[in-house]
Image (cartoon, rainbow, N blue to C red):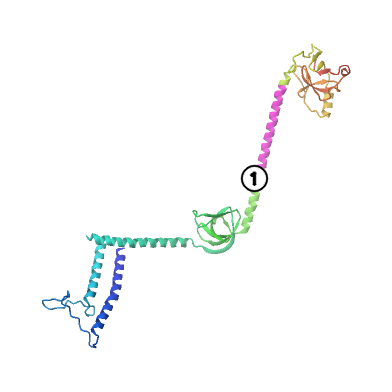
Amino acid sequence: MKKRILSLYLSAMIAVLAFTVPAMAAYASETAGEGSTAAPMQEEAAPDSPYFDSETGDDSAMPTDAAGQLISPETAQAIDSADVGLTDLQKATDPESSNESAANGASDTMAELEETEVDMNKSTIGAAFDNAYQFDKEDAVVYLSEAAVIKTEPSDDADDMLTLEKYSSVRLTGSNSLQYWEVTVGGSIGYVDSAVIIRDASEVEALKEEDIEKEETEALSRKEQEETIVEKASDGREEWAQALKDSRREELANQTRSLSWNGPVLSRSKGSVYGPSGKETYYNLNMSGCVSNMNRRGYYYDVWVRNDGCKMFGDYIMCAANLGVHPFGSLVECSLGTCIVVDTGGFAAGNPNQLDIAVTW
């Protein structure tokens, strides 16, 4: 760095001298030869010149140029000033120099030059960066293997221009060995991650077919899962219904009387009582014909026997009644519980409100 500063200073001094010395020499020659054709005479030193010795009258110390011609005191002084300035600069740039003021001045000069150099380095770095993102020119339609963001600059930190869907087509205008490539979308230049670019249209079609197969597989899997859930739910409902039925059946099996009747209850020992709907009697016959008749009428219930001997059709005790008063399928309350009419008999003509209860007694 010191050599650079010294070189710059010397170049400036040489330029000044190259212009000043010939000009002043020409002026002196022109002045001396004005009105005369004789060779120019050496200029006499003035009595007040620093080169004139007043005691001896000697002016041999008068400065001359490289050709031996006298030069003016002003020119000599300029040269001396240049030498002094150069010497000061050398001293200032010398680490061993004790001239603190000159060193400070030189340090300022060096700082300015270093700052200039930093700026130049930044420019150089910028140029190198620009060169690094130079693109090989292209002009081709390409496709995106997945949804991608188009950037305003070739950088992850750049702003998003827009987002394109999977398999969208764009025009590729520049590529390189780096991450982002240059594309044109809607007349605007943007940059997209090169990893998602597909050049071959046939490859896009193959990927689309894979997507369709994948969607079909996933749809089938979802359907199977839904069917499994529905099946489990159905099984659960059936189990719940069966559990409820079993619980209800257990309650009914242990029932011995109507829950809403506080009067006498029909039994083997009490062959006839008056219950909540009228006179009650009982009979023990094969009820299969009655059950078939009820099935034809749309009644499908389990046939079973309660713990106290009552013959059941579903949740109800089977009975015979006057069909004009209680048609088939009617629910009628008796002293033993709720009955369902599945039969009739000759008693109905003489006592239309009588119920004949089917039991195993």
Q: Which residue lies furthest to the left in this view?
A: 55
Q: Residue visible at 71% across and 23% down?
A: 248
Q: Can you give x and y, in whole percent of width and height, for residue 185 in the image?
A: 57, 59
Q: Is residue 97 left or right of residue 245?
A: left
Q: Quadrant of the C terminus?
A: top right
Q: Is residue 33 above or below residue 104?
A: below
- What amino acid is labelled 1 in the image? Glu
Task: Find the magenta span and give its range.
Answer: 221-250
Residue 256 inside the magenta-drawn segment? no
Q: Quadrant of the N terminus?
A: bottom left
**Quadrant in which residue 327 is drawn:** top right
Q: Nearer the viewer, residue 208 or 336?
A: 336
Q: Residue visible at 70% across and 28% down?
A: 241
Q: Which SS does the magenta portion mostly show?
A: helix
Q: Is mark 1 on a helix, strand or loop?
A: helix
Confirm whether residue 316 shows in the render. yes
Q: Can you give x and y, in whole percent of width and height, for residue 257 in the image?
A: 75, 16
Residue 230 inside the magenta-drawn segment? yes
Confirm whether residue 94 shows in the render. no
Q: In this view, does 353 lie above or below 34?
A: above
